[in-house]
Image (cartoon, helix red, strand yellow):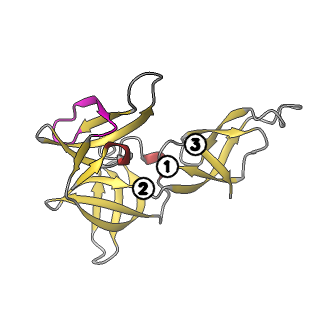
Amino acid sequence: MKISAFDIRLGNILEHEKGLWRVLKTDFVKPGKGGAFVQIEMKNIETGTKSNTRFRSGESVEKAVVEPRTMQYLYADATGYVFMDNENFEQLILSADLLEGQTGYLLPNTEIQINLHNDRPIGVELPPVVVLEVSEADPAIKGQTATGSYKAARMETGITVMVPQFVNAGEKIRVNTVDGSYIDRS
């Protein structure tokens, strides 16, 4: 299925240069001169090599035909991340390499879409927004609340998110899973 270069999202699986590639990062660029383009960081699923590729605004890319299956994330252990199929209750273990960049948004008992290509797990599509609890945050600096300044806060999953000064430890916030940015308090 062909999709526009601007519709490529984190976690998408693309067929590019005779291989399957998982999108790790997208950056939309509109330079002063010339047309807009999308800079995509991808990782080959079979070989593990990374590539930075630039797609112009008019280009389209082949999105891999995958079978989406809704599974529940259970827990992580030394072998990997354990998911349970909601239909037949079979468990599936995915390695951290397959979930690169997405593990910080996984909470136990969360439903996640696992993508299968020829009955082989090739990636995960996270919900666009997750609610995470702030485990550590620096105290607000007096007088900084009105300026729109941000501070680093560690979430319960271990990732760091830049949050406004008024957010404190113990609060729950909504985080964008595409770019890891703060949306609002939950």
Q: Which residue is situated farthest in the right direction here?
A: 143
Quadrant (top left, top right, bottom left, bottom right) of the N terminus: bottom left
Report the disc number at residue 126. 2
Q: Residues within 10 Å of mark 1 (few under 14, many from 20)?
A: some
Q: Is residue 136 left or right of residue 38?
A: right
Residue 169: x and y, percent?
Answer: 73, 46
Residue 184: x and y, percent?
Answer: 68, 52
Q: Residues within 10 Å of mark 3 (few under 14, many from 20)?
A: some
Q: Earlier in the sequence, mark 1 or mark 2?
A: 2
Q: Residue at x 83, y 37 (%)?
A: 145
Three-letter amino acid code at the position of disc 2: Leu
Residue 25 versus residue 68 in the image, above or below: above
Q: Nearer the viewer, residue 65 or 54?
A: 54
Q: Which residue is situated farthest in the top direction here?
A: 33
Residue 114: x and y, percent?
Answer: 31, 60
Report the disc number at residue 177. 1
Q: Residue at x 79, y 43 (%)?
A: 166
